[in-house]
Image: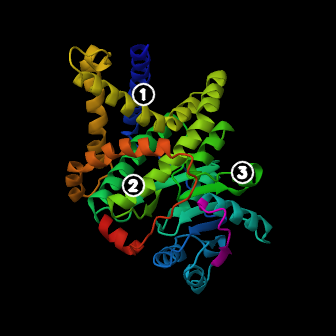
Amino acid sequence: MLDTVLVVLQVVFVLIGGYQTIIAFFGLSRAPKRETYAPQKSFAILVAAHNEEKVVGALLENLRHLNYPKELYDVFVIADNCTDRTAAIARSYGVHACERHDPSRRGKGYAIEWMLRELWKMPRQYDAVVMFDADNLASPDYLLHMNNDLCSGSRVIQAYLDTKNPHDSWITSAYAVSYWFCNRLWQMSRTNLGLANYLGGTGMCFESKLLQEIGWGATSLVEDLEFTMRCVKKGIYPKFSYEAKVFDEKPLSFKASWKQRLRWMQGHFEVARRYFFPLLWQGIKERNWTKIDMSLYALNVYNVFITGLVTVILYMDMLLPGQPHLTSIYAQAPWLLLTLSLLSVIQFPIALFLERAPKKIIKSLITFPIYLLSWYPLTFYAFFTQTNKQWSHTQHTRVIRIDEMQKQAS
């Protein structure tokens, strides 16, 4: 009985892994650029901040100089349960500092939900809402691209997520590699295939009318993934804007990275439980591959958990005296699985080449497997602690300005 279950699980997750690997290669080419429009959409830019006095100033300076008519956007800093000078710094830049104090409801999802209620009460109404984290930087043409996408009919848009400190440590380099990979071989591939893209937590743009219609309602530890699932379930497909870039600060140490990624995986388990089966069933009934594809994306956390568990069981069986008692499908079809494994590995250097990553990042591929393998114990721990809904703050201290990012890129 155990052997049958393990074989079925191996087949199912090899098929899912093979599907994801094949899909990735549809991102080798870039989608054609969308039509351009004169600036006409107005934006409320929300900056979620909890004790971010060290970095918020660099972002506000960056937003002040966006290449977009100043009368068409306003900036609102959500000083969420802050005990530092975040709100005072925001006011010194002449933007709206909106202070929220609710220790019982901590986290970005709750802060955004509160801010949107406040925003709808204001005399001025905006065509769209943009969301950033306080440690971000945005490309100067960010709003121009969001304007183009909104005018083209998009209602939910995710920008290209990049790393503003890829060379600080081996762990920030690993984040950078995974981001370049996801942008090109996950997001772009789905753009080329006409599937839904997923939201990445920052650099997101939403049509105001849509937010007013369906509400925010995403207060889990991974509010971006939760809102993605809500949209796709309703037939609203997020789009990816390759040209609009947002740079995000990544943790410098493995310990800080573990803490951040653990929160992501705990939240991912919750979202998978709530949305995988309903979205998969809806996709099957409607013969809608976009919904099926997104349901498989929701299942990724269980993919890591179950494949890791099955691998451990099979290795333990091999170490027992005598012949193995359990069936490994790798032994049944070694060349097929070896080919899939090789394809999944070479995707990362391919993504670096396509995205013209800095040459010195290549050496990070030596330590990158450590980062990838660390997802397995992390996901195991997240599975057994997934009932923990306590939001944890990632401290940001790396003050980099947009002109420095542009200099690095050149």
SS for callout 2: helix
Label 2 neighbour load within 10 Å: few <14, some 14-19, many 20+: some
Please report the bounds of the magenta region as a residue range: 96-108
Pointers 1 and 3 in contact (C-beta within 8 Å) = no
Q: Is residue 18 left or right of residue 203?
A: left
Q: What separation in Å lies between label 1 and label 2 (alpha carbons)?
A: 28 Å
Residue at 61% across / 50% down in the picture?
156
Image: 201 above or below 22: below
Does residue 306 appear in the picture of this structure? yes
Which of marks 3 and 2 precedes in the sequence? 3
Pointer 1: what residue?
Answer: 19
Residue 197 showing in the rendered view? no
Q: Nearer the viewer, mark 2 or mark 3?
A: 2
The stretch drawn in magenta includes residue 197? no
Q: Residue 17, position in %: x, y?
A: 40, 29
Point 71% across, 57% down: residue: 208
Image quadrant containing the N terminus: top left
Classify mark 3: helix, strand or loop: helix
Residue at image mark 3: 210
User: Which kind of residue does numbered mark 3 sit on?
Assistant: Leu
Between tags 1 and 2, which lies in front?
A: 2
Label at residue 258:
2
Amino acid at circle 2: Trp
Whichever of labels 1 and 3 marks the residue nearer the N terminus, that label is 1
Q: Tell me which numbered mark, 1 or 2, is placed earlier along the sequence.
A: 1
Question: Residue 248's spot in the image, x, y percent?
Answer: 43, 62
Q: In the rendered structure, does residue 100 fall within the stretch colored magenta?
A: yes
